[in-house]
Amino acid sequence: MSTTPQNPTTLPATIETARKQFELACKSAEGLQTLNNFGAAFQAVNVVSLLRQALTDEVMDAVFMPLQNTKIGFLTDHTGKARGNRPPLQPYGREIVRDAIIDAVTVGLMPTGNQFNIIAERMYPTKEGYTALLRRLGVKYFIETGYDKGQAEGFAEIPCKITYSYGGEKNGFSITATVKKDSYSSPDQIRGKAERRAKKALYEYITGCDFGDADEDSSTPIDVVAEEVETEANKGAQIGRKTPSQEPQPQPQGTPQAAQPAQAKPQATAAPNPAKPKMDF
């Protein structure tokens, strides 16, 4: 009597059902930014409802929790590893991870490819995340990052020039990205953080959506404690042209500086010592 061997990749029925619900929620979330406020509210409720139905404890444990603190999934500030003399912070539980995934999917991010991080229990888009969001909008852009002009220890000030094409419009603006650094930070890492700030500024300028900020590093595993990143959670780059006397000064404990209103399109200005532009066409 012969039997048909079971495919080891076949998912249990409950997981397969959840997968279909999750994919439907992701597809529904794609249209959120194209609707007016009222329509978006109704569709957002549907997306969140679908996600909560799909992300059961069984699904979280089997599918999404193993993605935590991996580059193929998403990084967090709770790695379970000791840092110096500080005790390790245990990885986040399923409730925090589930809420972060829901927040991510509703704005158009996926729980794979390091598109978001969880820092101080909150979801923040990474450089890869903003790249995905801008691509979804159909934005074409160049980012030219300069070199550190900051004088304060612990912070770098990187001039960035952004030129873009979106919806038939071509324009650009410059920012100064203030990013945290330490004795282990390489110039490439610092400029990578500045590039993320530039993409964040471009996305916010086009959409008006601000997802907050944190001291994340989307190119290396995060190994910082929540108390350290909370002071950075809302520090963002400034949009618009600045004279030297107006350059933002890094203030680790200060009030975050708000972006300038966007009634008029800021004009692109050349960044000092620009490196080879980042192409994302």
Image: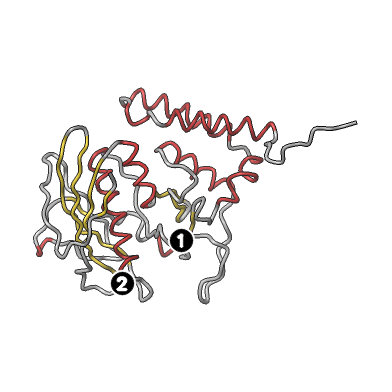
Per the image, label 1 sits on a secondary structure element best described as helix
Q: How many marks?
A: 2
The quadrant of the image that shows the N terminus is top right
**Quick one: SS at disc 2?**
loop
Q: Which residue is mark 1?
A: 226
- Callout 1 amino acid: Ala
The residue under label 2 is 154
- The quadrant in which the C terminus is found is top left
> Does residue 229 appear left or right of residue 264 in this picture?
right
Q: Nearer the viewer, residue 111 or 155?
A: 111
Residue 171 x/y as whole percent: 14, 42
Say whether residue 230 is left or right of residue 52: left
Query: Could you tell me if residue 253 is visible in this image?
Result: no
* Residue name at image x 64 percent, y 46 percent: 61
Which quadrant holds residue 136? top left
Near-viewer residue (194 or 231) = 194
Quarter-of-image position of residue 37 = top left
**In the visual, does 192 lie left or right of 241?**
right
Q: Earlier in the sequence, mark 1 or mark 2?
A: 2
Q: Position of residue 253 (x, y in %)?
A: 31, 64
Tell me if residue 227 comes above or below residue 68 in the rendering.
Answer: below
Closest to the observer, 220 or 59: 220
